[in-house]
Amino acid sequence: MADFNVAASERTFEELFARVRDSISPSTMGSRDLGPFSVQWAAGFRLEGGSIELQADNSVRISELDVVYDPLSLTLGVDIPRICIGGFCIFALPFVGCVLRAPRICIFEADPDISLPLNISGLVTSEISGAFRINTSYFVDPGRLPTMTDLDAFDAGVPNKWQFFLDPIWLDIDLIDTSDTVGNILDAAIDNVVDGLLGFLPGWARDLIKAILGPIVDLVRAVLDIVDDLDEWLSNLLGVSIGLFDWVATQVADILAAQFPIFEFDDPYQVLGYSGPVPLIPVAIPLRDVDAVVDDDEMTISANVGA
Amino acid sequence: MALTDHSDVFGSVQEDGFNRIFQHLLLQRPSLFSYGTQWFQSNPQHLCHRIKFHPEVQRRGNPLVSVEDPLPVPGTGGRFGLDFCAQLVDVKLDLHPNNGFNLPGELDPLPRQQGALTARFCVGLRCPDAGLSHQLGDQVAFELEQGKIDPRQDDAPRLPPTPIPGERVICFCLDVFATFGIDRIITAQGEVLVPRLRGFEIVDIRPEGLENAMECYVEATLRVGILPRLRFAVDVFIDGLGDFLGLAPALTPLSPDVPNNPAIEEDQLKVFVSLGF
Amino acid sequence: MTRLINTHALETRKIDSAALGHMAMIAHPMAEPGMYVGQVHKDRAVVAEFTLEVVTDEGATQADIDLGRVVGMPGAAKAPLRYRVSAGGYALFFVSQGPGGYRVVLSKRPERGEEDQLKPGFDSSALGKGDLFVLSLIRPGTWKLEERSTRAQATIAVSYILPGKEAYRPKEEATTLSLSDQGLSIEKLEIGPGEGVVIGVETSKAQFSVLLEDADDGPETRARQTSEPDDRTSRRVRWNNPRAGRP
């Protein structure tokens, strides 16, 4: 049996995980031209909830970990069609048809682009589930100079550490819910933007252009290729076009596997601190053969005292 | 049965681990185990037991010996004394059950929930040369006549005795055995674990009075001098965990499921901790 | 966001065939092959030129000549725009950009052996037989159409279109009427915004003017206009200009 054994119950493990979970808040931004429309995004997420199950096979199962997207701002760039009049037949001949046609004169002289800002922070949630192994690794702080002794490194706040990470075996991410209000936000954004675009026009001209455009929300939804199901469209946009879910999964995997340990301790580990006026140096114990195993009750970290 | 069936965190240290920790303690804080006068501090080669130490000790200017006043020579009014050293070496721990070394009959069998400790307690005395002692005796007689040494002036502040030089250091070592338990006490810093001596024995000194006196002296040294400096490890570990989680851990209260906490059993020191979720 | 919108077209309240602007077109039949020079006048000055080649082979039945573009082209005078149409086709003049107000004079360039002078032909300020005056009105309201030489008149009511569930599409077929010495064949017509009105000229020296007499600003404005007087009578303060000399 190892010199030291520390066992953390499943409840304690949940707390250790919660501390890591609550530290995760990456963000990203980008843009992409998707043909009929373009999208710019600024996205970030945090994790909430989730249930932990320690497994007898030395793995940890995390289920129903909520991914709350905040911020999640999309700016959709949409080309709405040119507004043209004319094109009617001026003069037609029997059997020949129209021989003189009015030119089409466009009120919009170029394809107008509209930008639809959609702030849907907190309105889209995903769930992550996954299986993890505990990976024990030894961390040498990059701020530690080669000339430093262990005590110098401790004094400088850059001690070596034993760290325990959740190393993903697999991760699943599902878009589980889109708030109903997303549709309303989209429709309101379309109306607002079009009203803003045409705002300088007299009312009759606005009405006429809107009448020619037809139901503007339908038009823009058509350009965006939203057929019936907004959830499906948004899922496709976020998941496939933007690659948001891949990014989230990669971030979660990278952060858990290498950035935020569920637990760590210094090496050497101090058992007596500085003492007295001289002062006497701390007494620190080198720990070796450090390992962490999981069964269905607890996680146990073991270590031997080094020479 | 899981280790954490009745607590949030379970920690244990094997007796072999403790013995290895003692080796680091000896290397990194030698002055905890070696005491002596300034002369021994300045001349560690004369100590009864050569001290090995960690390079950081010398680099940070830490002492090898905790300096004590010389042992007063009676009749000199505290004016003169003898250099001495006392060292605890070859410390070895055995947690219940007793299977690491044989305890003397007075301490055997080791009670449940106790540990045993054996060490060598070495004492050295710097013995003055006979000639120099005569000279100092004449000086004392002269100062008595001059009234410079007055044993009746009990309340007068005194300087430490002046050590009498000598060429010889006389050393002897005693094998000492102790049994101990761990008490939980409340301090200003909260609840801490404190090792407490339960029994002490020095083997085979005659006459018996000398044995008893030596036992009394060494036991006092351990109780008053050394053990108060060894309140460590377990509470350090608990506090570290608390800082990490942002919680206030405490030892799990005693109950039928946790009858002893900490527990000394199965060659381990076990600690059960509740995190106060 | 691009917002290039033709405000001139939206602001047009008066149309004159002799000073062509938005929402009106003139089609002139080009029967005789040859090279024609077009001069674009504004305020009695020639502001741009173009050439129109009328060819005998079958090709384009119409030449769309955007006077706004002709005038607006940088260096237009140095390199006139060239157009081409088949004999028997039409030169169609219109304005899609800029303020408009143009008169077009089209003259045939003399061929070899002829006198070295341009032969005046078509003048948009005096439309002749066979010419077509085409309107494409978008401003809702009642427009008054008048031809000056015959004093013929007609009213054109352009309906107000509200945005609805279906997109509004102007009719493909234009409403056709004719101008003869007796006047216009239809004196009152109703169209939707952007629908065509074609007036075939059967007289000479015709000149049309179209004036927005009564703008229709939509049902909301109409409702407000009818309800406002009662609601606001007590709050109305009339200001009279003291220099007008009467109360």
Image: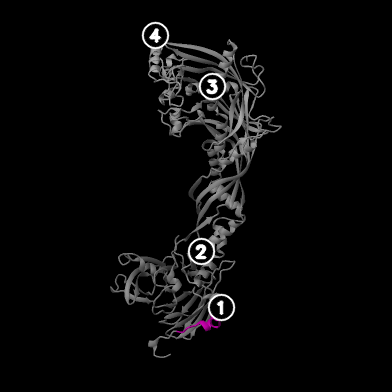
Label 1: element kind: helix
**Residue toward you, A56 or B179:** B179
Residue type at numbered disc 2: Val
**Residue B221: image tag:** 3
Look at the image and tell me in which quarter the N terminus of chain C lies.
bottom left
Look at the image and tell me in which quarter the C terminus of chain C lies.
bottom left
Question: Taking the image as drawn, is residue A182 in sight?
Answer: yes
Kindly identify which chain the residue marked by label 3 belongs to.
B
Q: Which residues are magenta?
A: C224-238
Question: Mark 3 or 4 closer to N-term?
Answer: 4
Q: Is residue C227 magenta?
A: yes
Q: Quadrant of residue C206?
A: bottom left
* Residue at mark 1 shares a chain with residue at mark 4: no
**Separation of residues labelled 2 and 1 (CA atoms):** 25 Å
**Separation of residues labelled 1 and 3 (CA atoms):** 106 Å
* Residue at mark 3 shares a chain with residue at mark 4: yes
**Residue toward you, A34 or B22:** B22
Position of A125 with respect to A143 (left or right) is right
Q: Nearer the viewer, mark 1 or mark 4?
A: 4
- Check disc 2: other Cα within 10 Å, few if <14, some if 14-19, many if 20+: some
Label 2: element kind: helix
**Residue toward you, C213 or B112:** B112
Q: Which residue is most to the right?
A: B256
**Separation of residues labelled 3 and 4 (CA atoms):** 34 Å
Q: Nearer the viewer, mark 3 or mark 4?
A: 4
* Residue ID at (43%, 70%): C7
**Residue at label 1?**
C223
Establish if C142 lies above or below B193. below
**Residue B131: image tag:** 4
